[in-house]
Amino acid sequence: MEKVSRREALLAGATLNQVFGSEPVPLVAFGPHQVSRLIVGGNPISGNSHISPEVSRQMRDYFTAARVLELLRRCEQAGINTWQARGDRHILRLLNEHRLQGGRMHFIAQTASELADIPAHIRALAAEGAIGIYHHGSQTDRFWKAGKIEQAREMLKVMRDTGVRVGLGTHIPEVIDYAEEKGWDLDFYMACLYNLSEPRPQAGGEAFEDDDRPKMLERIRRTSKQCLIFKVYGAGRKCGSPEARYEALRLVAAYAKPSDCVVIGMYPKASEQVLENCRLFREAFAAAS
C-alpha cells in the first residue's frame, strides 16, 4: 500500500492490523471481560519517567490531550483494548474524552494514594467504569515496610464491594508471598519486575537491578492469580534496540502464565511504538509457547 492509501484506509475505519498485515494482539479473560494481553500503561502520559526530572517534564510537554487520545486510538486500531493508568482527575478526564470520541478502551485504575479518602476514591473509579482497580504499588510497599500491610487489605475489601476486579500492586516479591499465604481476597497482582522500594543512594535514587527480575517472575509463575507485569523494559533502560526489547519480553514470556498480561507505557515522540510493541510481544510470546 502507498502511504496515502494507508492513511485513507485508517480514516475509513480499518485497523492497523488490517492495513499493515499484522496479527491481532491475543485476548484473555479478565473476569467477564476480554482484555488484550498487551496493555498500554499510563506512566508516560502522567509524566512519570523513572529516568530524570527532565525526561518527566518532556513527557508532560509531549502528551497534550490530543496526543493522548491519538495514542489510545492507535492502540485500539492495533488490537490493544485496555489502558492501565492512575485514577486521578487528569486521567479520568482523558478517558471521558476518549469515550466521547467513540473509544472503547477498557480501563484498569491505580488508586491515587495522595487522596485523603481512598474508599470514596475507589467507589468513584468503579462508577467511572473501571473494570479493575488495584492498590497503588508504592503505597502497598510503604505499608509493608511500616508493618501496616493490613491497611492495604482493607482497601481491597472496598474494591470487592464495588464489583470490580480487585488488584494489589507491589514492587516487593515478598508482598505477594504474604498475600498468598494469608489467602487475601483479590483477583490480580500488578507486579513490577524491579524492586524500586529499596533506596539505593549509590545509584542516585531508584536503581533498576536485573537481578530483581527473576525474583518477581518466580512469584508470578507460582501464583494462580492473574498478573499484570510492568516495568518490562525497565522504564526505558531496555529500549536501546528492538533486540533488547525483544529479549526483555522473551524473559517475561518464559515465566508468564497464559492468563498474565504485560503492561507497557508508550512514548511515541521520536518513533512509532504501538505496532512495534505489538510485533515484539507476539514474536516473544510465540517463541516461548
Image (cartoon, grey):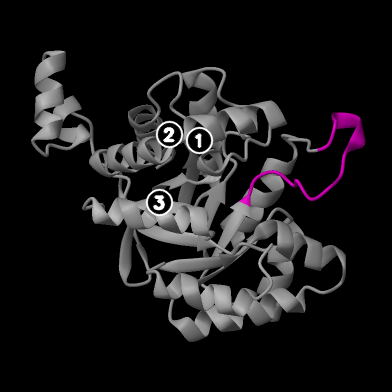
Q: Are marks 2 and 1 in contact (CB under 8 Å)?
A: yes
Q: Which residue is mark 1?
A: 249
Quarter that holds the C terminus: top left
Residue in the picture at 32% in, 45% down: 80
Q: Please identify the dominant SS of the magenta region.
A: loop
Image location of residue 100, percent across then percent down = 25, 55
- In-front residue for pair 30/47: 47
Amino acid carrying label 2: it is Ala
Residue in the picture at 16% in, 15% down: 3
Residue in the picture at 52% in, 60% down: 87
Amino acid carrying label 1: it is Leu
Label 2 crowd bin: few (<14), some (14–19), many (20+), radius 10 Å: many
Image location of residue 112, percent across then percent down = 61, 62
**Label 2 to label 1, Cα distance in Å?**
6 Å
Q: Which residue is mark 3?
A: 94
Q: Which residue is mark 2?
A: 284
Quarter that holds the N terminus: top left
Label 1 vs 3, first from the N-terminus: 3
